[in-house]
Amino acid sequence: MTTPAEKRPAESRPGLSEVAPIARTERSAAKAHANAVRKERTRRLLLRLALFVVLPTALATAYYAFWASDQFESYSLFTVQSSELRPSLGMDGLLAGLAGGSGPGHDALAVRDYVLSRDMLARLDKEQGFIRHYKDPKHDFFSRLASDASFEDAYEYFALKVLADYDQVSGSVTVRVRAFDAKTAQSFVQSVIAYSEEMVNKLSERERRDRIAFAEADVKRAEERLALARKAIVALQQTHADFNPLQTATAAMTIRTALEAELAKARAELMQLKSFMKEDAPQARAVAEKVKSLSAQVSGESRRLVDPSKPNGLNTSLADFEGAMVEKEFAQKAYETAMADLEVARTDANRQHRYVALIARPSLADESTYPLRIRSVFTALILSFLTWGIVTMLIAAVREHARL
């Protein structure tokens, strides 16, 4: 069986001389198309490189070289000292320091927080014109504070220009301030240290006042308690008409004891007389009357000490008076203890004093330290390359997804 191609005459079939030029033409066209695609991709790559790398880097270079305003930094180093007696370096001193939870280190941390607070910004702006300095339009737009910035915006900007670090090893605080003028930066640091010292003095003075006030309040309460105890004793003396029921009871017990001894002696004498005399004998009757009189006196002294028919007897007044005396003794001891604590508090308050000790005075820069121009340009270059790489990867991913 023959195919249609075989049935065609030999002269109608294309020869090898005609096929070769066609193949070369197709290869040339494919090569030209590939070159065009490659050139287009290269053009796009260079365009993205110029757009995302060259242009930002050039702009950053121009900004930091010709436009960025110079910034000067002033720094100072200080610590908070205390005139209190420091604990020993032994275990007892260490435990006492840990239990106290306060000290120069704690005060230094408080000063660090105060330096970075809104109160510090408000006072610097009120007395030193802090915000006005950074809003000055003669400085470049990207470095200065916006003219319509709110206080919260200014505080965020303040956190970039004022830095305070606390060193746990030395217990010192380092304050750094950047400004557009070297003397202005130094002035700001001096003001920060002055305000911090005022704050430390106020805290120290308040602590001393609080300790003395607390001790004085204890003394006042002890005085009131002692006064009430004394008034209670006076009221009992007036109620029972007795200056000291305890002494009265002691005297009554002494008298009754003497009477009982004399009564026993008289009864013995009466029994002796009755052994050889009649009861109606004058001498026996006299001794009997003596026994009767002594018995009546003993009964009277006993009723004087304890008499159920009298609610305000000596026993009742003695019980009330003993309770009042015990309360007075406790009140007296509490008053003496409070007075001793007050003296100790006053002594400690006079000895206790905290102050800011400068280690390094505020510096005056002789040349600008910010911005870091070369480093900033290099950073812009690195970020531009990263951005260019991310954008290129995203475009490639989108195209690959579109082919699918």
Image (cartoon, grey):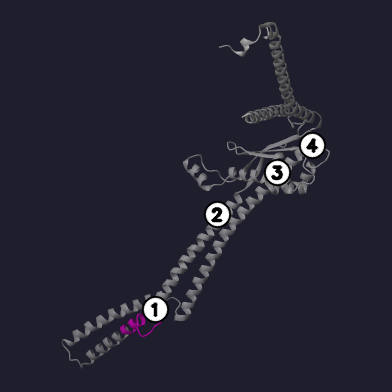
Task: Please tell me the numbered disc located at residue 181.
Answer: 4
Any mark on residue 3, and which?
none
| Badge 3 density bin: few <14, some 14–19, many ≥20, Cα 10 Å | few
Asked if 361 appears above or below 268 in the picture, the reply is above
Residue matched to label 2: 344
* Quarter-of-image position of residue 51: top right
Look at 49% across and 71% down and name the residue there.
229
Q: Residue furthest right?
A: 138
Which residue matches tag 1? 316
> Which sits in the foreground, 232 or 90?
90
Q: What separation in Å lies between label 3 and label 2 (alpha carbons)?
A: 47 Å
Asked if the residue at tag 2 contacts the one at tag 3, i.e. Cβ–Cβ closer than 8 Å, the answer is no
Q: Examine the rendered structure and indicate whether residue 313 appears above or below residue 376.
A: below
Look at discs 4 and 2 and give the one toward the viewer.
4
**Which quadrant holds the N terminus?**
top right
Residue 24 picture quarter: top right
Give the residue at mark 3: 156
- Tell me if label 4 and label 2 are in contact, CB under 8 Å: no
Q: Position of residue 160 (x, y in %)?
A: 70, 39
Density class for disc 1 (Cα within 10 Å; few <14, some 14-19, many ≥20) is some
Disc 4 or 1, which lies upstream in sequence? 4
Mark before the other along the chain sequence, 3 or 1: 3
Region of the chain picked out in magenta, as a range: 298-314
Of marks 2 and 1, which one's residue comes earlier in the chain?
1
